[in-house]
Image (spheres, rainbow, N blue to C red):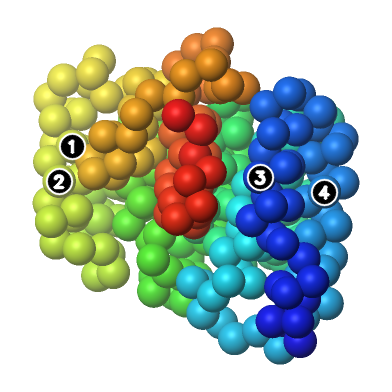
Amino acid sequence: MAKDIAKVIDFPKLLSTAKQHLIFHEYRTVISACVYGLELLRSTENLEDNDESSDGNRHKIALGVLAIQAVALDEGIDHVEAFVERWFGEIRAFPAEILQLCVCLYLHINNSHSAQKMIEEWLEDRKNQNHQGFDLVVELYIQNILIPKNQAEKAQNFLNACESISEKKKERLLLYVKRSQEVPSTCTSHSSISPLSSSENNIQEHQGTDIFSHGSGENLIWNAVKQAWRALFAPYHMIPQ
């Protein structure tokens, strides 16, 4: 049935249309379009497998990424978590891309407490350690939450105990933690650090259509959005350049 739904609904077209409405600040239209797609996908959820790379899951995450931005801009960031829980369940069940965007939005309004609570709840679930985006979530946690809050010891202990990230990533983050203690002023502001991995920093800067274009906090959010789009829909060339 999931395949039948996909045949009836052109999800790439729906997503492209919703993205254009977002660019033109037509937030209610974006939300309506995304909810329509999410409702269709929900009707087939019980028949989908748990493959995070399946078309159904990819479409669901992409709709969520767009809808979250629209909700944040139309209703306020405080309304985002309730919207996400409605469509993705409890925090532990959030896809990594959705989690990162929610965390970045909290950081944008300087609510690091909620950001930390959310990301730690997600990290505590062992099932998430197998998620393709686990390394990026850990990177966001260390660089944008623990270090800015002067919790270097907690960051170091977490990394030493974490067996699910690559050794290369672990070594790089441990070095980052060490340097943050040596030169605190270079590592204590989450606004100066991107949640993207080093390989993602080559993405061309967004030009002309960036809805978050007024400061470094917004750039952090936009980087998370770009990472999600790059991971999910690069074949559809939907990342604005």
SS for dot 4: helix
Q: Position of residue 187 (x, y in %)?
A: 27, 24
SS for dot 2: helix
Tell whether 93 sits left or right of 164: right
Q: Are marks 4 and 3 in contact (CB under 8 Å)?
A: no
Distance (Cα) linking label 2 and label 4: 41 Å
Dot 3 amino acid type: Ser
Q: Crowdedness of circle 1 by 10 Å Cα count: few (<14), some, many (20+)?
A: some
Q: Are marks 1 and 3 in contact (CB under 8 Å)?
A: no
Pointer 4 residue: 33
Of pointers 2 and 4, the one earlier in the residue sequence: 4
Q: Position of residue 63 (x, y in %)?
A: 68, 53
Q: Are marks 1 and 2 in contact (CB under 8 Å)?
A: yes
Pointer 1 residue: 176
Distance (Cα) linking label 1 and label 4: 41 Å
Residue 20 in which image quadrant? top right
Could you tell me which quadrant the N terminus lies in?
Answer: bottom right
